Image: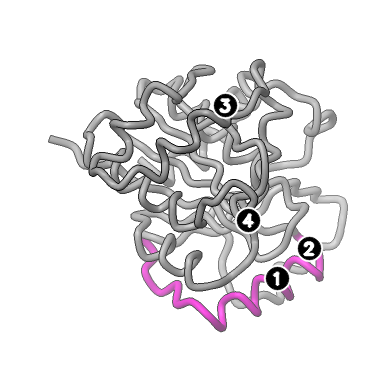
Amino acid sequence: EKETVIALVYSASGGVGKSTLALGISSALAKSFNKVLYINAQRINSFQNRLSNPSSIPNSAVSEFTNASGNLFGRISHIIRNEGFDYLPPFSMALPSIGLDFAIYAEIAKSAKASKKYDVIIIDTDCVFDKEKADLITLSDKVIIVVEQTKNSVFSTNMLLKNISCNDNEKYHFVCNNFNDKESNAIVSSNYVVNEYVRHFDSFDSIKINDLAKQPDIQKVSYLIV
């Protein structure tokens, strides 16, 4: 029986299109007949602007996440929605404002993996590096580090690599997002090797998730996971 793969999509700095890419990867994997769960593990959720149903988890359901009994995913499974792939809907406010700890995301992923319902669990997280983020990296079978070709992105990623070891080429993959071959590529002076390039295309910000999944570059990134 095939093991569930937990894949973390991460970047060293914001604004690199990481969440858009993670949603596209989730859709591409689902279209390739994988059962996919997408978890947006950010302190403030904003990914929902790309969804058909952007509504938040009802406040009345938040207590399900703090219930002391086991099988967390079983308790919250009725909250899970689907837009081609399953996803955890957004929380209405930042986690501390509703009494939840960031570690809840790792607990959800572990519980969902134990359910054996999914082939792939995509965890899309913010660029803060702390103990909780290190725990997510340890938990994950694959880590997709999203970079851009800019000097700022390369510098930030090089700084990140001082804190984590990416020697395992089966686990860690670097993806350059929004690549434009007409502009200078600072990655040539970086401390890492990019596995895949996702080329710049117009209307990236407004394109539908289903259309993202049809992009050949995003499909190639999804192959790094399965």
**Pointer 2 residue:** 185
Q: Quadrant of residue 22?
A: top right
Check residue 188 in the rendering and tell me which mark sits there, or answer none: 1
Q: Closer to us: mark 3 or mark 2?
A: 3
Indicate the colouring scheme. Answer: one colour
For the residue marked with disc 3, what is the amino acid? Answer: Pro
Check residue 58 in the rendering and tell me which mark sits there, or answer none: 3
Q: Closer to us: mark 4 or mark 3?
A: 3
Highlighted range, magenta: 149-170
Q: Dot 4: within a 10 Å radius of its alpha carbon, few (fewer than 14), some, or many (20 or more) residues? A: many
CB contact under 8 Å: marks 2 and 1:
yes
Give residue 5's position: percent from left, percent from top.
Answer: 32, 44
Q: Is residue 179 left or right of residue 102?
A: right
Q: Closer to us: mark 3 or mark 1?
A: 3
CB contact under 8 Å: marks 4 and 1:
no
| Sequence-wise first label, 3 or 1 | 3
Compute the Cα span from label 3 to label 2: 44 Å
| Sequence-wise first label, 4 or 2 | 4
Point out the residue furthest to the left here: 1
Q: Closer to us: mark 4 or mark 2?
A: 4
Point out the residue furthest to the right here: 183
**Pointer 4 residue:** 126
